[in-house]
């Protein structure tokens, strides 16, 4: 059995964070946070855990490390939160480094283990609160800290200026009009049926997704709009850093940008964590009883369009595909059947991974782990050998992946384990198959 001390990864954010810490400061922050921000749930989790270890089989880190107990969910909770509670926060700065490494990089907050626990203990919640404490102590991996800072400074995680955002949309509109002469990307259209919402990396690295979404909206005759103002970036690394104040600020800006336009609903692009931040974390932090504007994920949107006969394809995708079930939309939101309806509508042959649906393994990128950057890439690769096996065993080459983070994580796994596979968004496939005007 390894220990966290055996596998410390150098990270400037974590190192700089603990350099300024004292045991007194740690105690103060731990006890204030436990008293002010946790309650009966955490106490019940700690007191009802039987140390039975059944959660271990649920975790891809544990399974991928030859069942090393150090990676089991219960061990992660014991080595972090339970120790902080037992010692009333009296731990050294070096121990905080170890706890931060466990919580930020050895748990994807994917909640798979909760399915295996006979009393439903949610280790992801416990790790989230460990991250919160580390954030308040300023002990956060550098890369994800930078991303969260960018978002809280500029209201998007990529430092995209307001005019660059508008330029990117207009550029995609221009490009798409060569193929679809009537196409528009309407900006700030008040009262539109659909407010289409993307994450910061789309205008920066994946502009084709905006192009494709515009093509689909155009072909389906949707009354839609995109916002020209801050609030457009629905991603949320503040949520994963533990900076709940800025998470709430970002989610409020997002909702308010839609309310300002009096749109009927928000359609989120193919992203898992952004969806979680708006249906689960940010809305709760803000104390919303109901969503101020109805929100659906792209899977639900495409499913609706298919039911209404608004997506017309010339033929089905011929090569066999498999499906990645992103935790935040499948385990978190129950969209597994709709995802399959959409993929079966589009594709001739679907080969399921085993296990699948709500039992699917996380891609190991989620929970902000991929955003912790290059220092922790090997943690992700070695921590998800089971995903590589799962993918390889399907025998197919194409994977439908309706989540940005899963794309990043799975592309890395494909490269590291030499799987020779490719990830596709649903939008990629619809665009490829859809009827297009003859020019
Ligand atoms: S990575 Fe997922 S399965 Fe593993 S401990 Fe975290 S929430 Fe549980
Ligand atoms: S399965 Fe539940 S009760 Fe058993 S060790 Fe894991 S968290 Fe504790
Ligand atoms: S990146 Fe994808 S698979 Fe991984 S936690 Fe997020 S939704 Fe889950």
Image (cartoon, grey):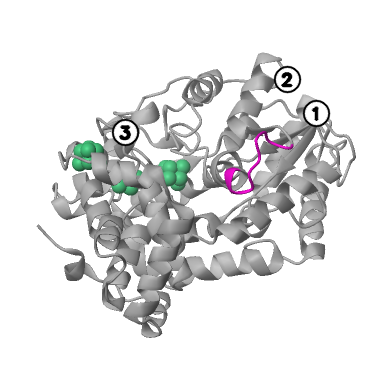
Mark 3, residue position: 120
The reply, left or right, for residue 245 in relation to residue 343 is right
**Label 3: few (<14), some (14–19) or many (≥20) C-alpha neighbours in 10 Å:** some
* On-image quarter of the C terminus: top right
Mark 2, residue position: 310
Res. 256 in view: yes
Q: Nearer the viewer, residue 114 or 39?
A: 39
Instruction: Determine whether the residue tagged by mark 2 lies in a helix, strand or loop.
Output: loop
- Quick check: which quadrant has ligand 1? top left
Answer yes or no: disc 3 within 8 Å of ligand 2: yes
Q: Is mark 1 in CB contact (under 8 Å) with mark 3?
A: no
Compared to residue 26, the image places residue 336 above or below, namely above
Answer yes or no: disc 1 within 8 Å of ligand 3: no
Q: Going 24% across and 39% down the picture, which residue do you hit?
A: 48
Query: Could you tell me residue 307's position as x and y percent?
Result: 66, 15
* On-image quarter of the N terminus: bottom left
The reply, left or right, for residue 123 in relation to residue 265 is left
Instruction: Determine whether the residue tagged by mark 1 lies in a helix, strand or loop.
Output: loop
Instruction: Determine whether the residue tagged by mark 3 lies in a helix, strand or loop.
Output: loop
Answer yes or no: disc 2 within 8 Å of ligand 3: no
Q: Nearer the viewer, residue 87 or 178?
A: 87
Mark 1, residue position: 222
Query: Could you tell me residue 63's position as x and y percent?
Result: 20, 44
Compared to residue 84, the image places residue 40 above or below, namely above
* The residue stretch that appears in magenta: 284-292
Query: Could you tell me residue 237's position as x and y percent?
Result: 54, 58
Q: Is mark 3 in CB contact (under 8 Å) with mark 2?
A: no
Q: Going 28% across and 49% down the picture, which residue do you hit?
A: 384
């Amino acid at each position: 059995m390894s220990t966290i001390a055996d596998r410390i990864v150098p990270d400037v954010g974590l190192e700089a964070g603990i350099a300024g810490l004292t045991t007194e400061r740690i105690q103060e922050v731990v006890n204030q946070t436990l008293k002010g921000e946790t309650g009966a749930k955490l106490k019940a989790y700690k007191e009802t855990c039987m140390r039975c270890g059944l959660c271990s089989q649920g975790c891809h880190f544990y399974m991928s490390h030859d069942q090393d107990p150090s990676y089991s969910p219960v061990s992660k909770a014991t080595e972090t939160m339970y120790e902080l509670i037992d010692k009333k926060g009296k731990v050294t700065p070096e121990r905080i480094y170890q706890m931060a490494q466990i919580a930020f990089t050895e748990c994807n907050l994917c909640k798979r283990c909760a399915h295996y626990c006979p009393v439903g203990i949610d280790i992801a919640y416990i790790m989230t609160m460990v991250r919160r404490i580390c954030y308040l102590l300023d002990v956060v991996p550098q890369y994800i800290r930078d991303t969260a800072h960018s978002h809280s400074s500029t209201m998007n995680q990529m430092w995209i200026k307001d005019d660059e955002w508008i330029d990117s949309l207009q550029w995609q509109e221009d490009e798409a009009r060569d193929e679809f002469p009537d196409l528009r990307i309407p900006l700030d259209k008040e009262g539109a049926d659909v407010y289409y919402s993307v994450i910061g990396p789309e205008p920066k690295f994946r502009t084709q997704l905006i192009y494709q979404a515009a093509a689909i909206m155009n072909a389906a005759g949707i009354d839609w709009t995109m916002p020209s103002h801050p609030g457009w970036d629905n991603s949320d690394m503040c949520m994963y850093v533990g900076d709940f104040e800025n998470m709430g600020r970002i989610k409020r800006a997002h909702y308010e940008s839609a309310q300002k336009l009096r749109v009927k609903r928000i359609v989120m692009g193919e992203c898992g964590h952004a969806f979680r931040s708006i249906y689960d974390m940010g809305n709760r932090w803000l104390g919303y009883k109901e969503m101020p504007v109805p929100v659906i994920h792209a899977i639900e949107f495409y499913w609706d369009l298919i039911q209404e006969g608004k997506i017309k394809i010339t033929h089905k995708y011929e090569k066999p595909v498999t499906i990645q079930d992103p935790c935040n939309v499948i385990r978190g939101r129950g969209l597994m059947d709709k995802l399959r309806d959409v993929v079966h509508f589009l594709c001739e042959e679907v080969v399921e991974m085993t296990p699948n649906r709500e039992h699917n393994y996380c891609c190991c990128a989620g929970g902000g782990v991929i955003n912790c950057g290059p220092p922790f890439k090997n943690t992700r690769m070695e921590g998800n050998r089971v995903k590589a096996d799962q993918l390889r065993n399907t025998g197919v080459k194409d994977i439908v992946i309706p989540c940005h983070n899963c794309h990043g994580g799975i592309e890395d796994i494909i490269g590291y384990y030499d799987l020779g596979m490719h990830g596709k968004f649903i939008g990629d496939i619809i665009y490829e198959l859809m009827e297009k005007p003859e020019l």
